Image (tube, coloured by chain):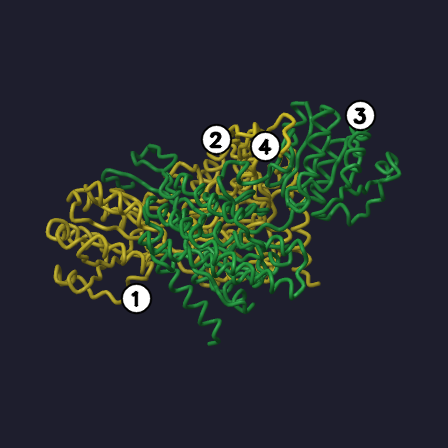
Chain colours: A yellow, B green
Amino acid sequence: MGTVTKLIESIGKNARSAAKELRVASTGKKNSALVNIAKHIDANRKDILDANKKDLNNGKNIGLDDALLDRLMLDNERIDGIILSLNQIVALADPIGEITDLKYRPSGIQVGKMRSPLGIIGIIYESRPNVTIDATALCLKSGNGAILRGGSEAIESNISLFKCVKKGLVSAGLDENCVQLIDTTDRQAVTELVKASEYVDAIIPRGGKGLVEAISKNAKMPVIKHLHGVCHTYIDKDANTEKAINISFNAKTRRYGVCNATETLLVHASAVGRVMPELITQYLAKGVELRGCDNAQKLSDKIKPATEEDWDTEYLSAILSIRIVSSMTQAISHIDRHGSGHTESIVTENYSTARRFLTEVDSSSVMVNASTGFADGFEYGLGAEIGISTDKFHVRGPVGLEGLTSQKYIVLGDGHTRE
Amino acid sequence: MGTVTKLIESIGKNARSAAKELRVASTGKKNSALVNIAKHIDANRKDILDANKKDLNNGKNIGLDDALLDRLMLDNERIDGIILSLNQIVALADPIGEITDLKYRPSGIQVGKMRSPLGIIGIIYESRPNVTIDATALCLKSGNGAILRGGSEAIESNISLFKCVKKGLVSAGLDENCVQLIDTTDRQAVTELVKASEYVDAIIPRGGKGLVEAISKNAKMPVIKHLHGVCHTYIDKDANTEKAINISFNAKTRRYGVCNATETLLVHASAVGRVMPELITQYLAKGVELRGCDNAQKLSDKIKPATEEDWDTEYLSAILSIRIVSSMTQAISHIDRHGSGHTESIVTENYSTARRFLTEVDSSSVMVNASTGFADGFEYGLGAEIGISTDKFHVRGPVGLEGLTSQKYIVLGDGHTRE
């Protein structure tokens, strides 16, 4: 057996044993671990920032681009953010053990559901070192063991942050193997991890489409996957002009590099006259490149032609494609064909139109009169998110604590036997 | 491309197109299809029974055993059961479109969840022809397209029942391809179906452990799997004697060939004296073979030694293994090690013991003072079940309509933009 195979097996076995204890750990113990981790991070800022500097220097040496270096970078403000996020997760209700729908059945038994952990979650992520702590916190609070595998470019930062995790676990009286970090940068470790279905109950890949697709293809266990976000805003013929302009502008320009940014604007032909001149002015003033269908191009000579490929593209940058449609049916068809099932929003004052859009659009978030930028675990009240699932199986949309749990049935009787 | 590959592709494409319509079909239309199917089955009893006779004759010729022939057999009473089951599913609330947890967030948006279908479900099953109708009904009502693949031994019965499905769909104005039956007995069809992730969103194998394992291994889409039921009843030291005896006897002897039958009885040493003599007498009188640990064997010379293999065996017959334990901790360890995560029950009057058992036992159903025989979709109030999931991912325990759905987020705003 190779070294990496042995490493993953040993991590897996340790995780199984630790997870058994964590599964039934009290809320108090789990919270105390999270509070302790936050304290250790606060007390070890210098070590963490030093480690991060090493990563940044290595990154510069191997020619990482500025966007990647920015994601990699930690400073005191970002460490404050990590600590705040830990304390926010402490404040969330413990999902484990929650009993719902407990009802009497005609036989006399009471049947309900009790929420319990999935087991052990493998998280494979890139650059951003804060994921080490976010993933730790969400898994711990939801009673799941965690096996973390960060990007090689962030290895020093992750090891440094992870030291605080270990200390926090131990000082709360939990098994230090509840959370483990794969500290080799050997890519073989990922290959082995996603095959280890005996030790890992679910895999969450956080990263680009390539990473997610590769892992989904090879994983021997369920994958909670977030592929990409080709999000749409549809301005209906019955849209309020001001709302249409504000929402469409915000949905594209709030932040460009995020998955919930609108990439394609669909506009009903009868709304074009009252919304597009102003919107085009605003987009261009903000530096957004516009690409449109034939009819859209007629609105301004600044609008370039959109190709078929444009409709399928997650730009993640200051580009917007625009299509004029003749009906909501056509808008929904466009979304069905080109959308990624992430988030779509309609702007309309028409009750029946809104009701139909909510029902017919098959995406993880469907909105009426709100910016697609709201598609986010914090905005939805999950307190935190480990990703956004574009799958339908198990969990859909922003994934918080509940998404990392399952429900078992509980039955309460008083000597009941079945006929 | 081979004939079977072409067949599956054609079925898949038709299913995708039909499922799009079914996803948004009204409750009335779906119910009307179910009622029509029931009427057609009632009107075509003779054809169905004739077809079933062909299957039974073929089965006898190829030497199927009596248990299998019994599962295959239809008569007027069983057809009544199929019709009743259809009407019961009509009476269930439509899960699709249900909105829950709609709450205002600090930003002013309202966020909630709306239940929607998974898409297209592939169901692979054996012998029992009623599954053709149960699966049809559950998928239809939950807005999912269905691709059915029954056992080759039931092919004539399935084709005959399926004719009624087609007629029912068409007369309700639904696309006849909402439900499709793979009417070739070529095994290659299963191989192709479980690879067709483009057309099938989830696979449900209903059958023996071999079938389920083979499909889980090869499927390119999520599998809702029911592996096997090694269920336990634990008689605690604080058990009420009468309840302990009644529950343990019922859990084993109600029916032998079912997955929720207790296969191993765990008895606390201090309860042995007051429960075991009577229980042993009852079991032996009923013809149950008893196998026990060393201490259990001392209770009667009729108790044979249990091997290590016994603890892991789903007997599905009149055999019970018995182990005397010195604590609940030991009982739970035994369940952890040998159970299949299906159903376990404790008999106790002790509040803290019951509470601990419910929390610590990691099975799809955990019971207090009730027979494991209750683990069943009908008994739990799901109205019907398409199987019992021993998985934790997506759905656990008996799977009814909700298990075939997912929840998307909906956001209602009034022109809200995000900062």
In the rendered image, which quarter contains the N terminus of chain A? Answer: bottom right
- Which of discs 2 and 4 lies nearer the camera? The answer is 4
Q: Which amino acid type corresponds to the residue marked 1 in the rendered image?
A: Glu
- Which of discs 2 and 1 lies nearer the camera? The answer is 1
Determine whether, in the image, residue A142 is placed left or right of residue B418. Answer: right
Q: Which residue sits furthest front?
A: B46
Q: Which residue is mark 2?
A: A91
- Percent coordinates x, y for residue A188 in the rendering: 60, 62
Same chain shared by disc 2 and disc 4: yes
In the rendered image, which quarter contains the C terminus of chain A? Answer: top right
How would you rate the neighbour count of disc 3 (Cα within 10 Å): few for under 14, some for 14-19, many for 20 or more?
some
Q: Which residue is mark 3?
A: B274
Tell me which numbered mark, 2 or 1, is placed earlier along the sequence.
Answer: 2
Determine whether, in the image, residue B20 is placed left or right of residue B353. Answer: left
* Distance between the alpha carbons at the discs numbered 3 and 2: 49 Å
Q: Which amino acid type corresponds to the residue marked 2 in the rendered image?
A: Ala
Q: Which residue is mark 4?
A: A411
Q: Which amino acid type corresponds to the residue marked 3 in the rendered image?
A: Arg
